[in-house]
Amino acid sequence: MHPHYVYQAITALDIKTKEKQPFFKIPIQYLKNNENAIYIYSKEKYKGPAEPIEEGQIKIVDIYDYKELPELPSATSDYYKNESRNGNRFGLFHYVPHFLSLGEVEIGNVEIITWNEIK
């Protein structure tokens, strides 16, 4: 998922943040020699940071079948709104699936993007 969706959601709540936060845009092909998985990180199954991850929440990924999320999960948007309304600090990627890659990732020639714009 492009980090712009996170930026959009938090700025819509008038939360002040660094405007040009950089991120590496790593092409999925760069991970072809690694072991890859996705941590689903669903609201329904998440029990807290100190609890074990439930079975079925981590799935092995074939990079050729991988599809990037086209938007911020609604559970994440709701989380931002609730935490902001209550005056709490919160994690930016809560309930966003996490891509895990075991192995080396060459970043020497990758594009660096900022979250305040999407191309």
Image: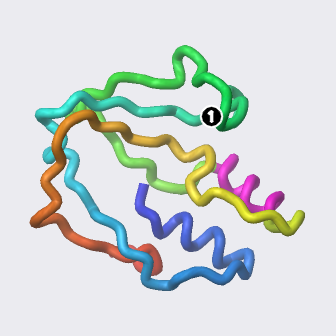
From what the image shows, is residue 12 above or below residue 9?
below
Give x and y (percent) for residue 50. 67, 32
Secondary structure state at the residue bearing disc 1? loop
Quadrant of the image for the C terminus?
bottom left
Res. 108 image quadrant = bottom left
Q: Is the magenta stretch mostly helix, strand or loop?
A: helix
Q: In which quarter of the image is residue 107?
A: bottom left
Residue 11 is situated, as x and y percent measured from the top left of the image, at: 64, 78
Q: Does the magenta stretch include residue 12?
A: no
Q: Reply above or below: 67 against 18.
A: above
Q: Quadrant of the N terminus?
A: bottom left
Q: Which residue is drawn at 42% across and 79% down?
A: 117
In the picture provided, is 115 more to the left or to the right than 41? left
Say which residue label 1 marks.
42
Residue at the outermost top position: 55
Residue 30: x and y, percent?
14, 47
Give how far across and how far down residue 102 sits, in percent. 26, 34
Count all numbered tags in the image, as a single digit: 1
Residue for point 50% across, 84% down: 19
- Magenta stretch: includes residue 76: yes
Query: Magenta region: which residues?
Result: 74-83
6 vs 106: above or below: below
Q: Residue at x 47, y 69 (%)?
A: 4
Q: Badge 1: few (under 14), some or many (20 or more) residues near its Cα, within 10 Å?
A: some
Q: Which residue is drawn at 37% across and 48% down?
A: 68
Asked whether 73 or 55 is in front, the reply is 55
Q: For this rendering, which residue is in front, 74 or 54?
A: 54
Q: Please indicate whether residue 40 sits to the left or right of residue 20 in the image.
A: right
Amino acid residing under circle 1:
Ser
